[in-house]
Every structure is written in C-alpha cells, then in structure tokens.
Amino acid sequence: MSYRNTMVRARNPAVRTLLVERAARMLRVREPVTLRSLVAGTGVSTMAVYTYFGGMDGVWRALRQEGFTRLAARYATLATSQDPIRDLTVLVAVYLGNALEHPDLYRVMFDAAFDLEDLAAAEATLEYLVRAAERARETGRFRADVAPREVAVRSWVVAHGLVSLVANGPLPHQALADGVPLLVALFVSWGDEPARCRRSVADGWGSVAEAEGLRVPLVRAEDAGFEPARGVNPNTISNRAP
C-alpha cells in the first residue's frame, strides 16, 4: 500500500508499524534516525511522525515499547512445565534469544532517556519470571525466605550482562554458554539442590534451543560440570555463528 501524497487524517495502525519497523531497521544498519530520514522512501510525510508519535521523542518511546512487545510475544508462546527451575531457565534463554535477534531494539529498551508508552505492559514481561520463581518456592526448590521478584531481577541481570557483552561488546557468541553455570550457581544459592538444579537448567536451556529455534551456543555437559537430565542431550543444542 502506498501512502505517498496523501494527507494523514485518520490513524492507520499500518502507518505506525511501518515507521517503527523502519526506525528499527535504520538502527540495525547504524543509520541516523531523524525526522526526514525516517520517512524518506516510505510514502508518508513528516506529518505522520507527529500524527502517530507526537514527534521524534514519541518514536523513541515506541521503539522502547516494541522491544518489550516482542519479548512478551515470545514469552506468551511458552508452555509451563512441572519444573519451575527449567521454566526459569527457558525464560532467561528466550530473553537472550530475543535480544540477539533484535540487538538494536534491545539496546533502546533500556534507554531511560525516554519513557515507555505502556510501563505496565513492559513490567509484565518480568512477571513471567516472578511467577516461575513463586512456583519454585512453593514446591520447595527455593527456600521459603526467597523473594520471587529478587529471583526474577537477578536472573535478568545475568541475561542482560551476557547480552551486553556479546551483542554489543567484546565477547564472542560462545560466551553465552556461561549462562548455564551462572544460572545454576544463582538458583543453588536460593536453595535448590545442586545436581537437580543442573539437570533442570540443562533441560530448559536445551529445550529452548531445539524447540524454539533459538540460536545459542553449544553447551556440553562436561563443560558445564554436570550430567544431563535423562533424555536430554546438551550436545544437540545449536551453535550460533560468531
């Protein structure tokens, strides 16, 4: 559909999506995002930026929100298992996969210079981890005094650190494999039994790579220092090209 030489009278979601996705593409190729460069070649006028976003600040807010929207969409497809530690691992791995798939959107997600369009919707992504941590506490995997929100935040800290160092930093993609022992150490510190924790983390990490198609590094049982869960072969986890 062409919007060239038309006046924007009514809000059309397709136009908003067009501009958000173009801004994301421009970030990906390190092209400066300005009012005129954003609309260049799209068939819409600069007025559309004001109509749909109220200006360039609104574009950045929309980009921040889009990162969380895509993460929420990935989380919404995940099934809950009987193992909350496995599920926590899956949520962390999906966070990693989403960030690596959309590195520029991911960077904007945490740019506090601009407010989010819907803070509650963004915070809802963290609630997935909070609920998994609550289940871990209720089933005795974590101690009774463990705060589920603290679990969620620290789990994301592990993921955020890895992504920051790999996607936009000095470490190779193979460094993502460190997420396995890091999560094991974190979960064990909250009371989970070490051997059982290692099996759950291996199971969760491997299932996401295979079933969800995430490109995360090869994890070998001997490298992570544990035996894989029955029926789980960590050596089948996909490699991400460096």
Image (tube, rainbow, N blue to C red):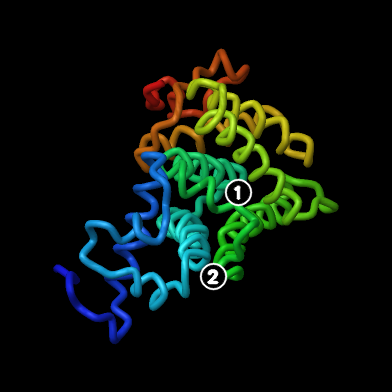
Closer to the chain start, of discs 1 and 2, is: 1
Q: Secondary structure at mark 2?
A: loop
The relative height of residue 30 versus residue 220 in the rendered view (above or below) is below
Q: Secondary structure at mark 1?
A: helix
Rendered residue at 67%/52% (across/down): 133
Residue furthest to the top: 222
Please tell me which residue is depicted at 29% across the width and 78% down the height of the picture. Answer: 12
Which mark is drawn over residue 129? none
Which is nearer the eye, 173 or 61?
61
Q: Amino acid at mark 1?
A: Pro
Callout 2 environment at 10 Å: few (<14), some (14 to 19), or many (20+)? some
As drawn, which residue projects farthest toward the bottom?
A: 9
Residue 64 picture location, percent across and down: 52, 58
Rendered location of residue 18, percent (x, y): 29, 63
Q: Which residue is mark 1?
A: 84
Q: Quadrant of the N terminus?
A: bottom left
In this picture, residue 200 sits left or right of residue 135? left
The percent position of residue 100, horizontal first and vertical second, equals: 45, 38
Q: In the rendered image, which residue does mark 2 sit on? A: 117
